[in-house]
Image: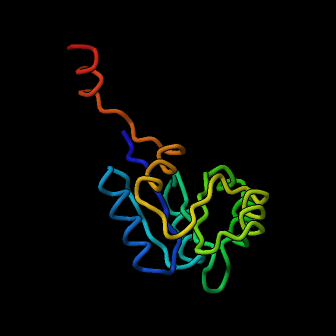
Amino acid sequence: MRIPRVLVIDDDPTIARLVRLTLHSKGYDVVVAENTHDGLKELFQQTTDLIILDYMLPEQNGLSFLKDLRAEPELATIPVIMMTTASVGEVVQAAIILGANDFLTKPFDLKTLLERVEKFVPMPEEDNDRNDENGK
């Protein structure tokens, strides 16, 4: 059974580390990229189940990257959660129009992060858990 893979694209090492540790503790395989160029390389190297994408990035902002991502047939269906420190309505609206599946405003609590991630990429149940529930 393959472990779900999440790509975090964020140039803030503190946020990236927090997201990585939180998701890793729940069993996700988490890869961090500091910019969209490195993120794109990661996407073409391995199957990715979810992208957590910061809005404010060096070189290319998250909205521009999202637009490029949705134009790429092999990557267009990967769910994307956008993150930003600004809860500007125009940014949220633009992200949704360009194909973002959800939005997180920084700072966010870890419970909200996990709920959003699990909505798109639930962890597979263990066989033992199913057997316990069935009384076996």
- Determine the residue positioned at 40% across, 61% down: 30
Q: Quadrant of the C terminus?
A: top left
Spot occupied by residue 75 in the image (x, y as percentages of width and height): 65, 56
Instruction: Pick out the residue farthest to the bottom.
Output: 59
Spot occupied by residue 105 in the image (x, y as percentages of width and height): 57, 66
Q: Is residue 50 left or right of residue 87?
A: left
Instruction: Pick out the residue farthest to the top.
Output: 135
Q: Quadrant of residue 132?
A: top left
Q: Quadrant of residue 17?
A: bottom left
Front-lying residue, 85 or 7 = 85
Front-lying residue, 103 or 17 = 103
- Determine the residue positioned at 42% across, 65% down: 31
- Determine the residue positioned at 55% across, 59% down: 51
Spot occupied by residue 127 in the image (x, y as percentages of width and height): 28, 27
Display coloring: rainbow
Q: Quadrant of the N terminus?
A: top left
Q: Quadrant of residue 82?
A: bottom right
Spot occupied by residue 112 in the image (x, y as percentages of width and height): 47, 54
Q: Is residue 19 above or below residue 59?
A: above
Instruction: Pick out the residue farthest to the left.
Output: 136
- Determine the residue positioned at 51% across, 63% down: 45
Q: How many marks?
A: 0
Front-lying residue, 42 or 61 = 61
Q: Is residue 88 above or below residue 135?
A: below
